[in-house]
Image: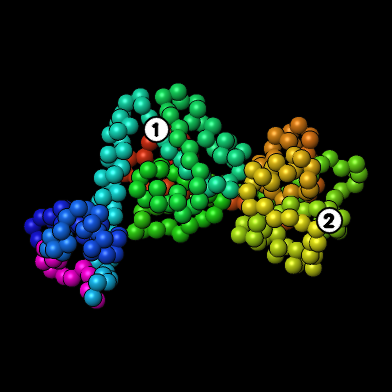
Amino acid sequence: MNQLNYHHLYYFWRVAKIGHLTQCAEKLHIAQSALSAQIKQLEEEIGQPLFLRNNRKLTLTDTGYQVLRYAEAIFNLGNQLLNEIKQGIGSSNKIIRIGAVATLSRNFQENFIRPIFEDPEVRLVLESASLNELLERLKLHHLDLILSNKPIATDHEAHWRCRLIAKQSVSLIGPPRRSKKAFNFPEDCHNLHLLLPGITSDIRSQFDVLCESLNFRPEHYSEVDDMAMLRLLARDKTGVVLVPEVVVQDELQQKTLEKYCTLPNVSENFYAISLNKAFPSDIFNKLLGDN
């Protein structure tokens, strides 16, 4: 093969992503027969089949999966190029697009993005959504970075990285106590209304493991899967919340809330998920502490 036909590769990429020849042809506004011919030409160029055809269903061969990985890298890099040009490469019009998981602490987000505001030439676009929605936008280069409290596996096909950027202990925090005695966990929890993260939270899983090891079962508790709501409920003195201190950092500084105790073996990790970009920006490197 002297030279790869990228037009054929693009059609293969779209078909592989959609998984259906007819639907892909409709989206590309071309005849199904023409699309099928393009795929066959690519297979002839490569010298191996890319799909196993079973009636209308298409399944990638081992070679097909390998070609798809390269196609993902090629066309995602093309999307990156277009985005960089739209922003103005080397110009003063710098944009960084960050997606944050909807349940992530707002205080942590603010602390993380603060260095961006030190550069007046940088414009921030901050979005909030579920992790799956943000990953799709990252894959298309519509985001530069995702902030998450859940890790993902490094994906060589999607070409993204997941880095631990912070780890914070988790505490029980509530209204100021009258007693000056040290708070003992779990003995002093029996008469408290605990406000706990939802069962899908890593913090909650660690808390449940700790309680099990101490043979303690909370009786009066509520579950809230949003850190902003937990902070609001804590401020309104609805109960005692289980959160990283960063969530209520302002209230702790103002002494409207008090830390009762830090729980052993319970912490929240914060992750930065990004693509292996060919040309990361200076502000991007500054945020992540890269040289």
Magenta span includes 41:
yes
Find disc 2 in the rendering and name its residue: 189
- Mark 2 vs mark 1, CA separation in Å: 47 Å
Is 16 left or right of 182, judged from the image as shown? left
**Residue at 58 percent of width and 36 percent of height:** 111
Tell me the SS state at disc 2.
helix
**Residue at 13 percent of width and 68 percent of height:** 47
The one nearer the camera, 214 or 241, is 241
Q: Above or below — where is 209 with respect to 86?
A: below
Amino acid carrying mark 2 in the image = Cys
Tag 2 near tag 1, CB within 8 Å: no
Question: What residue span does the magenta drawing correspond to?
Answer: 39-54
Q: Above or below — where is 13 with respect to 98?
A: below
Find disc 1 in the rendering and name its residue: 95
Q: Quadrant of the N terminus?
A: bottom left
Magenta span includes 116:
no
**Residue at 27 percent of width and 71 percent of height:** 57
Is 53 left or right of 243, judged from the image as shown? left
Q: Earlier in the sequence, mark 2 or mark 1?
A: 1
**Image position, residue 81 (x, y; %):** 27, 40
**Image position, residue 156 (x, y; %):** 36, 58
Amino acid carrying mark 1 in the image = Ile
Residue 246 visible: yes
Quick one: which residue is furthest to the bottom in this view? 54
**Image position, residue 110 (x, y; %):** 57, 35
